[in-house]
Image (cartoon, grey):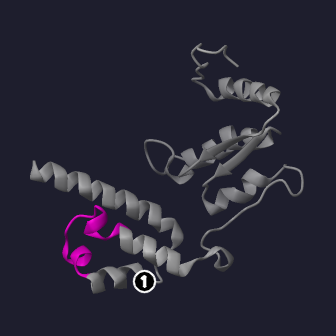
Amino acid sequence: MPAAGAPAPHATRTVDIFPEIGQLALSGRPVTIVVPDVDRAGPVRGTGEPARVVRDALKPLAAVESVRLLADVPREFAVELAEGLPPGVAQIIDLDAPEWADHEGLVRQAEALLDPRFGAPELPFTTEPDARRALAEDDGLPVHLLTPLASAVAELRRLVARLSD
C-alpha cells in the first residue's frame, strides 16, 4: 500500500493487478470488488471479450481469499466463474429467477425511468401515464433489461439536449 499522500500504484495489465490486490490482504479486511456489465466488455461485440474477462481477470480475483467479488456476468459464464472455488464460497444469483423477483419494485423502477419528471424525454409513450404504466408492466421486460433501459433513457436525454442546443 502506498504511504499516506503518495499516489496509488497504477496497474496497466491484468498480471499487475493481482499483486496489488494481494497486498490488500495485509489490511486484515476483505476487499469488495464490483464488476458490472461483463457482457458489454470490449470495443466490439462478438469477439469473446466477456469470456476473456471471466477467464483472465474475474476467476483469478475470485480465488483471492481477501476479495469479495460481485460480478454481473452472462449466465453462461456464471458457473465457469464459480468452478474451482471452495464449496459454499460462490453464490450465483439469477435476478430473472422467480425467487429474486420483486415485480412491483421493477415496475416502479421502469415507470420512473420512462417518466419525464425524472428526466426521460417527452415522447408519446413517456408523457402518457397509461402508456408508461403499460410498458413498465410488460412481463416481457426482464430484470437485466432495466440497466440497458436506463442507459437508453440517458442516451435519449443527451440526444434531446444536443438537439435543443
Q: Is residue 141 visible?
A: no
The residue most toward the right is 87
Magenta highlight on residue 118: yes
Q: Residues within 10 Å of mark 1 (few under 14, many from 20)?
A: some
- Residue at the spot 45% in from the left edge and 50% down from the top edge: 45
Q: Position of residue 160 (x, y in %)?
A: 18, 56
Reply above or below: 32 against 100: above
**Quarter in which the N terminus is drawn:** top right
Q: At x 64% / y 15%, what residue is drawn?
A: 4
Q: Residue at x 65, y 68 (%)?
A: 94
Magenta residues span: 113-128
Residue in front for this viewpoint, 57 or 129: 129
Q: Visible in this render: residue 33?
A: yes
Query: 38 or 10, which lies in front?
Result: 10
In the rendered image, which residue does mark 1 sit on? 137
Q: Position of residue 136 (x, y in %)?
A: 40, 79
Q: Is residue 112 left or right of residue 32?
A: left
Task: Name the residue: 12% across, 52% down.
Answer: 163
Question: What percent of the width, then of the height, locates residue 124?
Answer: 19, 77
Name the side, left or right, on which 101 lies relative to 161. Answer: right
**Exactly how many numbered labels are in the figure?**
1
* Side (left or right) of 69 relative to 142: right
Q: Answer with the quarter of the image where residue 119 lies.
A: bottom left
For the residue labelled by badge 1, is the local secondary structure a helix, a strand or a loop? loop
Q: Is residue 86 left or right of residue 79?
A: right
The part of the image, by quadrant, that contains residue 49 is top right
Question: Vertical placement of 130 versus 34: above or below?
Answer: below
> Which amino acid, by three-letter code, is at mark 1?
Glu
**Is residue 114 within the magenta segment?**
yes
Extreme residue in the left direction: 165
Q: Quadrant of residue 126?
A: bottom left
